[in-house]
Image: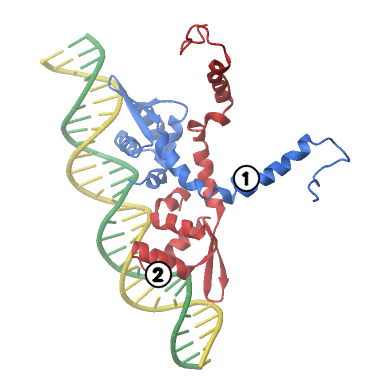
Chain colours: A red, B blue, C yellow, D green
Amino acid sequence: MQIFEVLADPVRRRILELLAPGEMASGEVVEVIGAEFGITQAAVSQHLKVLRESGFATVRAEAQRRLYSVDVAGLRAVDAWIGRFRNFWEPKLDALATEIARGKREPRNAPITKRGGKRARVR
Amino acid sequence: MQIFEVLADPVRRRILELLAPGEMASGEVVEVIGAEFGITQAAVSQHLKVLRESGFATVRAEAQRRLYSVDVAGLRAVDAWIGRFRNFWEPKLDALATEIARGKREPRNAPITKRGGKRARVR
DNA sequence: CACTAATATAAACAAATACTTATATTAAGA
DNA sequence: TCTTAATATAAGTATTTGTTTATATTAGTG
């Protein structure tokens, strides 16, 4: 399953939120998710499997219990894709945008001459 | 459609990549996506509709053409959700991490004494 | 106005997937 | 070893959704 499809399901996103503070046993996840979404243990277990196999969660055994934790691999991959668009709302990091930002800052430093307004850069 | 489901489709993700450099006519998108994925104009048009209605793209008309652009709303929303986990792989932003970062900056200002190298901060 | 170009929409269908119930696995405890 | 606890897996089903073909819309052109 593709990483973006993994996050497409609200139950799986919620499970990741539950795991965020620290590891959690399958049973505890079943309780919370069961209460919130009204689905069975089997369904939750299948979601946990998806999270495991797609790099969003890891498990360790402790007796019969399975303790799940967040695996950053999947989340980082998603973040990396989004990151290619981040300069759209955070132009600071872009080289060109740095120049633009400097241009925008000029009016602040320049003495007020004749109401420059928007028509700077008249060639 | 939920924002994460929007990104779950590889065609829609690719369309957003195509729009990233700047606006693009529907027809151009159809050409590229059609070549890459082998789907029809109708299919692409429906994907564009999804992107529109979910806040990932905007359109403006120019004669019969529809020029699509990236809308950051959707992407920001996704980024915000991911952001809640970012401290897993970028602990810098954390309050505690800020202090650590300040500590790391010290050697830059401090005069070179005895080949500081990596072992500063020996308490 | 008839025709073409560019795009969107409708209807129908097939594949994917999130669920269910039922059962299997694995470990601890009497 | 029998039983219980905790979790996973199997099989079946219904819903969702991405696609296609066919048609509708909207704007320019002869």
Question: Image check: B45 left or right of B13?
Answer: left
At label 2, counting other C-alpha atoms closer than 10 Å, the crowd grade (few under 14, some 14-19, many 20 or more) is some
Nearest to the observer: residue A109 or residue B120: A109
* Residue D18 location (% of width, % of height): 34, 44
* Residue B56 location (% of width, % of height): 38, 36
Cα distance between the residues tagged 1 and 2: 38 Å
At label 1, counting other C-alpha atoms closer than 10 Å, the crowd grade (few under 14, some 14-19, many 20 or more) is some
Q: Is residue B83 above or below residue A47?
A: above
Q: Is residue B82 above or below residue A69?
A: above
For the point 57% across and 31% down, which residue is it?
A93
Q: Mark 1 or 2, which is nearer the eye?
A: 1
Task: Please tell me in which quadrant of the rendered image residue B112 appears.
Answer: top right
Quickly name the residue at label 2.
A41
Callout 1: SS? helix
Quickly name the residue at label 1.
B92
**Residue under mark 2: which chain is it in?**
A
* Residue B85 location (% of width, % of height): 53, 50
For the point 40% across and 69% down, which residue is it?
A41
Nearest to the observer: residue A73 or residue C10: A73
Q: Is residue B15 visible?
A: no
At label 2, the amino acid type is Gln
* Residue A87 location (% of width, % of height): 51, 32
At label 1, the amino acid type is Lys
Quarter placement of the N terminus of chain B: top left
Q: Is residue C24 above or below residue A26?
A: below
